[in-house]
Amino acid sequence: MSYTIAITGKGGTGKTTIAALLVANLIRRGRRPVLAVDADPNSCLDSALGVRAENTVGRLREDARHTAAANPMISKRELLELKIAESLVEGDDFDLIAMGRPEGPGCYCYANNVLRDVLSQISASYPFVVLDNEAGLENLSRRLVTRVDLLLIAGDTSRNGTETVRRVLGLSREMGIKAEKLGIIINRVRGGRELGLADLKSSTGAEYLIRLPFDDEVLEYNEAGRSFMLLPEDNPVNLALGAFVDEVLKGQ
Ligand SMILES: Nc1ncnc2c1ncn2[C@@H]1O[C@H](COP(=O)(O)OP(=O)(O)OP(=O)(O)O)[C@@H](O)[C@H]1O
Ligand SMILES: [Mg+2]
């Protein structure tokens, strides 16, 4: 059985960075291979992990449509399943599957449904699945996964940052997303600021409340397009996420 961690939250709160660093920390603790799922059409989890996803599901869907039209003997579904399985990008100790943006006309729901089935089949071979979502719960709402073991909501220290976390949580509950456990990550905390977040944890029922410091090195890695797999282990954000991963593994 794989353990699925989904990261969500408002735009720009660090979801992709956190996803990549979680993958790195899981691997470091021998929990490999990890399946990373880039469920954000605009995202770049691939470069955050130091690989390149050419064949996104969005593109494959269009390919499969053309091939199936030319070959009536092949079912469109079989073809799409095959193509999605082939599209896995293999990294060291992890594989990545990327949604990409829908190409071509027509509804994306079909490809989404096929992807969901393929994901549930292949994820069985991975001890951990880490899902990076687009802001606004779009993919969670498309039921790419029906339940997750750990839902992480990323927020920031801005005045309405914690309110946004609550809103995202409310939305996820309205959508019927089943999460065994909830974690709230407050990212880019500057200095030793006391954020008065104890209430956030108790009022949301979150199991984990994680503060990640603002860190120039993380920002530089992002700006340079460098893989977060190479971020030094003793980087403060890496250390904080590593300690969090240890806690999650303990509670498993
Ligand atoms: N702890 C941190 N310290 C400094 N900068 C950070 C930190 N975490 C993330 N960032 C920076 O914040 C920016 C947004 O991060 P990221 O792309 O991971 O967010 P996101 O939530 O995935 O965004 P989107 O909603 O666009 O997908 C990036 O420039 C990233 O380098
Ligand atoms: Mg992102």
Image (cartoon, rainbow, N blue to C red):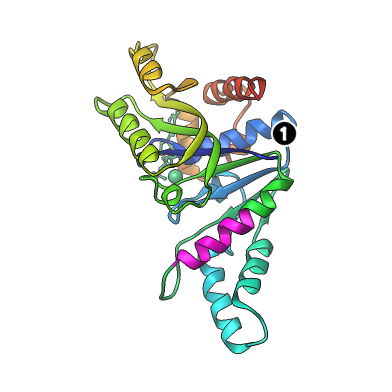
Of the pair 237 and 167, the residue shown nearer to us: 167
Secondary structure character of the magenta stretch overall? helix
Q: Is residue 42 left or right of residue 226?
A: left
- Could you tell me which quadrant the N terminus lies in? top right
Q: On the rendering, which quadrant does ligand 1 occupy? A: top left
Q: Residue at x 57, y 26 (%)?
A: 238
Q: Eyeballing the image, is 32 above or below 101? A: above
Tally of numbered tags: 1
The answer to which quarter of the image holds residue 94 is: top right
Q: For the residue labelled by badge 1, is the local secondary structure a helix, a strand or a loop?
A: loop
Q: Quadrant of residue 156?
A: top left
Is 17 in front, or is 114?
114
Q: Is residue 11 above or below residue 52?
A: above
Between 101 and 49, which is closer to the camera in this rendering?
101
Q: Is residue 29 shown left or right of residue 158?
A: right
Which amino acid type is shown beneath numbered disc 1? Arg
Residue 112 is inside the magenta segment: yes
Measured as percent of width and height from the top left, residue 50 is found at 61, 47
Query: Could one spot residue 237 in this view of the protein?
Result: yes
Residue 90 can be seen, yes or no: no
Give coordinates of residue 109: x percent, y percent: 46, 64
Whether disc 1's CB lies below 8 Å from ligand 1 is answered: no
Q: Position of residue 99 (x, y in %)?
A: 52, 58
Image quarter hosting the C terminus: top right
Q: Residue at the spot x=39%, y=39% of the render?
A: 172
Q: Is residue 175 magenta?
A: no
The residue at which mark 1 appears reads as 31
151 relative position to 80: left or right: left
> Which class describes the residues within 10 Å of circle 1: few (<14), some (14-19), or many (20+)?
some
Region in magenta: 108-119
